[in-house]
Each structure stands twice: as C-alpha cells, then as structure tokens.
Amino acid sequence: MNQQIIMPKRPSETCEVEATIAIIAGKWKPMILFNLRLGALRFSDIKRALPKTSDRMLIRSLRELEEDNLISREVFKEVPARVEYELTVRGKSLLPVLDVMSKWAATEHGIA
C-alpha cells in the first residue's frame, strides 16, 4: 500500500495532529484526562491513580491542562481546603480520542 505523507500547504500552517499533541503532550496529561472521564477528582485521587508521577510534575500538568481549558479547578472553602479537578466541555471532547488510544493499546499490546 502506497501511503502519501500529508504536508501543510505552507510552512507556517500547523498540522491538526501536531496541534492536538501540543495540547496533550507529555506522559501524564492524557492519563489525567482519562482518569477524570468518570467525574471530578481531588488531587490525592489523581496522585493515587498515577503513583509514578512526582507531585511537582502532577501539579505542573494540572496547571497546563487548566490553562488550556481542558479541566477546571474548584477550591472549596473548607478546613482543610479541598480542591477538585473536573473535565470541561473542551476536555470531554478529547474523550473519544483517549478511548481509541485505550482500545488500540488493548488490541495491539494486550493491555487490559
């Protein structure tokens, strides 16, 4: 099968795949988004789901996802303070992409 590589028409145009990867790039961002698919989670819940990440890297990834409007952060005025993260509408729009990635891994690599 002869496949052709699709190049942008002009060097200044960005490929759609490149644009998507730029937003969800990194080891932890897709995993954070995938874990938030069922609803809001506290920092400790996300950390428990991703035990190999450092607090610093997790905080950085959460901030970047919030800046890109993929997740929202709600601070509850309680003692001790409680913070929850949740997917935004924009973040939820990435769930089909993450589902396909998950299914591909299960099929191609036997990861369940």
Image (cartoon, rainbow, N blue to C red):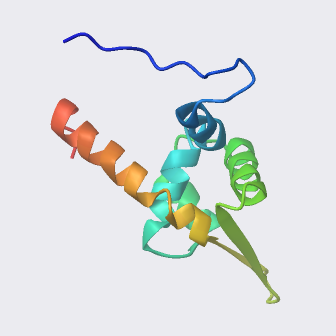
- Hey, which quadrant is residue 38 in on the image? bottom left
- State the residue at coordinates (69%, 20%): 10
- State the residue at coordinates (25%, 10%): 2
Is any atom of residue 85 visible in this view?
A: yes
In the image, is residue 5 above or below residue 101?
Answer: above
In the image, is residue 26 above or below residue 62?
Answer: above
Residue 87 in picture, x, y percent from top left = 58, 69
- Hey, which quadrant is residue 101 in on the image? top left
Is any atom of residue 26 visible in this view?
A: no
Q: Nearer the viewer, residue 49 or 87?
A: 87
Residue 15 in picture, x, y percent from top left = 59, 30
- State the residue at coordinates (58%, 46%): 29
Residue lying at the far top of the rendered structure:
2
Q: Nearer the viewer, residue 101 or 93?
A: 93
Residue lying at the far front of the rendered structure:
9
In this rendering, position of residue 80 left or right of residue 104: right
In this rendering, position of residue 83 left or right of residue 9: right
In the image, is residue 60 above or below residue 45?
Answer: above
Which image quarter holds the N terminus?
A: top left
- Hey, which quadrant is residue 109 in on the image? top left
